[in-house]
Amino acid sequence: VDRLYLGLPAALQGLGERRRTLNPTVVTFLVLYYIVVLVIGIWAMRRGAGEDLEGYLLGGRNVGPLVTALTLQSTSMSGYMFLGAGALSYTQGYWGLWFAAGDIGGGVLNLSILGRRMRKLSQIMGSLTSIEYLENRYPSPATRLIAASISVFLLAFYVLAQFIAGGKGLALVTGLSYPLALFIALAIIILYTFLGGYLAVAYTDFFQSLVMVVGVVWILVVSIYHTGGLTAANLKIAQVDPTLLSVWGKGLGYEGQWGVVAGAVAVFSIGYFGWPHVVTRHMAMQRPSTARMAGAYATLWNLLFVSSPYLVGILAIVILPGLDDPELAIFRIAQELLPPAVTGIVMAAIMAAIMSTADSLLLQTGSIASRDLYERFINPGASERQMVWVSRGLVLAIGVVGYFVALVEPPAVFDVVIFATSVLGSAFAPAFLCAVWWKKANTPGAIASMVLGAATALIWQVAGLEAQTTFHPMAAGILASTVTIVVVSLATQTVAPVAPHIVKAMEETVRLRPIPPEMLSMSDFALHPEAEEIGSMMGGGE
Amino acid sequence: VIRAIGTAVRASEAVAILEASAPVSAEVERELFYPFHWFLLRSSAKTLFGTSALGVSCLVDARRRRCATADPFETEDRVVTPENIVEPTLAESDGLRIAERYASYVVQRRRSAFVRQHLEVVEQDLVYKPFWIVHCRQERSRPFRMLVDGVTGGFYPLPAPCLSVNS
């Protein structure tokens, strides 16, 4: 390990220097933070929440919309926000805000264009996972095989970014060497995935989320204050490099390259559409107003949180010029400007977020591998024990390969996240969108779109075609997959028409009846199966 | 006599909920009870901090084979006429298989860990959920029917032809 460490890039070796200047107060409060989180968890579990699944699943119904919203958000914040976003702005200035714009708009777009209709269609077709949903909408074993393989491959990449973020963060916080910190972070994540044990309750997620948002906003406010305000900071950035103030990147590298800009915005807006997700059904026994309020709080939280790391990265250009590793900009600013006790608490919350995201991604990857590939294609009668071991085997393989990649040739967190999101979005976004919006989208069209979209984005990035074509891999991939699904679907309508039950299900998601629109928009879609069944018994529906 | 989930929304409230949502005139046609196989499952697994157990309440649609986790609820014995009941078509044993598979998937996700779970049935029953079928009229448009959840007050359009109030 030591020999490998000697071969590390200077940026990572620089972490060793931080070890010597480590503040014991930071470590004390870091440990205190974890003790508080543990105590909250144990307290909540003893109160009874720990013995009831619903205490976890929809604890928000008992704890109110604010806690529900922050609970959901705490798991969605990954290492990218704390390392990748800051590094991007630190090196490219205001160019990074294109990505932030896409990120902020992504959630809204996802909800308004895809979310509700897709949830309806998933419920009508009885799909439990997004891969199952794709296979139900585009019936063919090939749909599931291709979609699951692409997902497993790319989610593994995304996990790699979390490993690197966890290793770097732990090294900086504890003063351990990067290889050792990486090993510890990875071992904790994998051990947790294998054994579980500490069930996060709503209150712990809420606490972590609150610390994260307060911490990041605090870092931002202190940074603005330290630089004498945004105007003063901009003047100082202009002295370093005036092009960093433009939206075209350092040295105006992307000036007029609208294909690259479109891709940058699309990565986290359209790219989100491609993420595999879960559709499960819960039958509430209370009125659903909490969920609506929680949605509003989550949007507000996003507006507050998403742009902060990018802005801190920009201010770091002035505060910490010449950083060896720009990915550590936010961590280093926290160390420099916050009181040691606050630094310890905020860093602990960030580390917890990184690790919980890695854990969720591994779970997602393992589930797809065991349910959508192993059970479906290799061993249809697989027992739960076999499925668990297939998942664990894959997680272990990702861990071992990830450790060596992160140690020997660690890619930038930003690059890995953009790579995975671009290819996932290119592969799946048109297939998911057309699934609910275009009745003629058929199986050959979807399969060709997934393969060509993923291949285009992949080749574009690996071959470095962005620089030559001034077209972002995401934009190229989305264009390829969209054109493919349209052309192939239209060309194969006669040989592979969309099944009538699918067309009917799609029509159901729009439901044009003599019902007042305001009533329709307030209707509870969870009641669809019962309504359909009762309606058919009364002489309507199916 | 059936075991029904407690009705929290009365007929007059169902009407009021619909009339408050849009300019319609609503009238309750009848109350209908929809069947679910209910299972309270206990999922236990060995974890870092010893054996951990979770209770999972599952409702399996006894007609459409769909499963959902459920909030805790109270039941009451109700005397109802056969025309107000939707008969179950799914056997309880099949319902249990569906509930176990669903619960194991949901719990695994919630535990965030690939742990082997031992599932046992703590309680099970055939329960009926109350619904109101409400006939709605509006100016210059055809009448339509809405299904109102007798527990939550949520509503959804019924895809049934609406010829007269008592059809």
Image: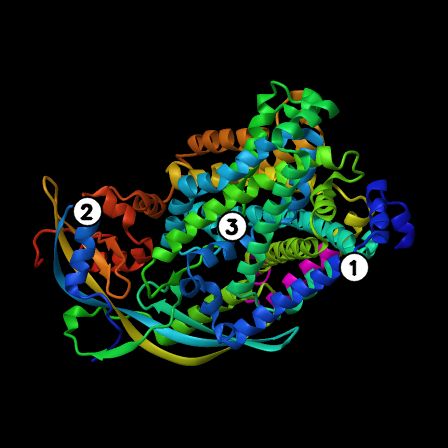
Residue that appears at 69% across and 65% down:
A191
Pointer 3: what residue? A141
Judge from the rendering whether residue B2 lies leftward or rightward of residue A411; answer left or right: left
Image quadrant occupied by the N terminus of chain B:
bottom left
* x and y, in percent, of residue A232 in the image: 65, 28
Looking at this view, name the residue that lies furthest to the top.
A256
Mark 1 residue element? helix
Q: Quadrant of residue A325?
A: top right
* x and y, in percent, of residue B133 in the image: 17, 60
Label disc, if present, on residue B22 of the rendered structure: 2
User: Looking at this view, is B141 or A162 the one in front?
Assistant: A162
Q: Is residue A393 magenta?
A: yes
Asked if labels 2 and 3 touch by Cβ distance under 8 angstroms, the answer is no
Which chain hosts label 2? B
Kindly report the secondary structure that dominates the magenta region of the rendered protein. Answer: helix
Q: Which residues are magenta?
A: A375-399
* x and y, in percent, of residue A463 in the image: 71, 30
Pointer 1: what residue? A24
